Image: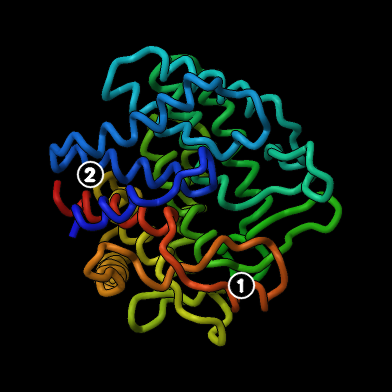
Amino acid sequence: MLRQVADCTARWPFRRWGFGEGIALRGLLATYRVSGNADYYEFAGALLREYVDRGVGMKNEEHIAPGIELLLMYEESGDDEFLEAARKLAALNASFPVNRFGARMHRPDMPGWRQQIWVDCLDVDGPFLVRLGRITGDEKYTRQGLEEILGYTWALQVEDSEEHSGLFWHGYEMNCGNNGQLWARGNGWALMGLVETLKLLPEACKARPELTERLQRLCAALKRHQHADGLWHTVITRPETYLESTLAVMTAFAWREAFEVSLLDEGVFGEMERKARSAAVRCVDEQGALGLVSDATPISELNMYATRPFGVFPWGQGPLLLMLAQESL
């Protein structure tokens, strides 16, 4: 199944870069590490090399570029050009304005989006910057990553609702506050970003207790809302919306990672992780495509989330590869 999913993922027409493409490359690199099949390494490396040669950190839309994957390729290859490209991407991130929570607003050039943030960025920025700090030994990157992930959690995580406490809103805009819905895939991005950041932080880091507590509240909320078959509704708190698979794949992967480093208690969340993993596997067809994956979803009213079509997308395939590669270790 891992090979089939990887081959299916490599057929995606990468745009360099659309959101979710980075995690697809991350999944292909994980597949290479457990399978030894260099084709996946070379495929990801060629895309990243083209990006580096073209120039990194030159346009605001690169906020969705694969920073973590540049660092993974540097660690695999030892090529300093990938590390230098990651530094340039970090400098672009540092150039963005911040909102009142300290979260970076990545598209100040776009009317209508100048003061908007998206939950998706929790998996992109914090883990990348903290990993860059760890690799280089430069604390400025670690501080930058912590400021980013803390600002996003302060802006987006529900605090004032007993039923919804711990879940994440899709977005926050300076003039209107939280917007969008309590979107399943968005909560998957938040979960993965929190786990990956915490895995990289030293035990003595002052931000670690707060981030751990926020992770645990998110997981408790996900446990309350998981469907009996292991999936979640695409708007988590709205059972009239359809069941969607990406959160199940993301949670299965992230929870297993969290159990292994004692971030979460497997006795509390283990059954939920196993249900999510089984549900995800049932959604994979014989060509290696993950089913029940919704199309790119803009911040909007409930009906937008409830009517997005299904398809084969890198934001489903990438987490699925990470989950399957994890099982092969």
Circle 2: element type? helix
- Residue 1 appears in view: yes
Question: Is 313 rendered above or below residue 227?
Answer: above
Question: Which mark is drawn over residue 83?
Answer: none
Q: Count residues near mark 1 (Cα–Cα under 10 Å), then give few for <14, some for 14-19, many for 20+.
A: many
| Nearest to the observer: residue 290 or residue 301 | 290
- Residue type for callout 2: Thr
Quarter occupied by residue 135: top left
Q: Quadrant of the N terminus?
A: bottom left
Q: What's the distance in space between the residues labelled 2 and 1, CA to CA? A: 31 Å
- Residue type for callout 1: Tyr
Q: Which residue is mark 1?
A: 305
Left or right position of 171 against 135: right
Q: Which residue is mark 2?
A: 31
Quarter occupied by residue 91: top right
Q: Residue at x 50, y 68 (%)?
A: 294
| Nearest to the observer: residue 153 or residue 107 | 107
Left or right position of 198 against 125: left
Label 2 vs 1, first from the N-terminus:
2
Question: Is 49 rendered above or below residue 136?
Answer: below
Q: How many marks?
A: 2
- Residue 224 appears in view: no
Q: Whole-percent x and y of residue 74?
A: 34, 21
Left or right position of 19 against 47: right
Circle 1: element type? helix
Question: Is 62 rendered above or below residue 155?
Answer: above
Residue located farthest toward the top when viewing the structure as drawn: 80
Q: Whole-percent x and y of residue 95?
A: 70, 25
Question: Is 46 rendered above or below residue 189?
Answer: above
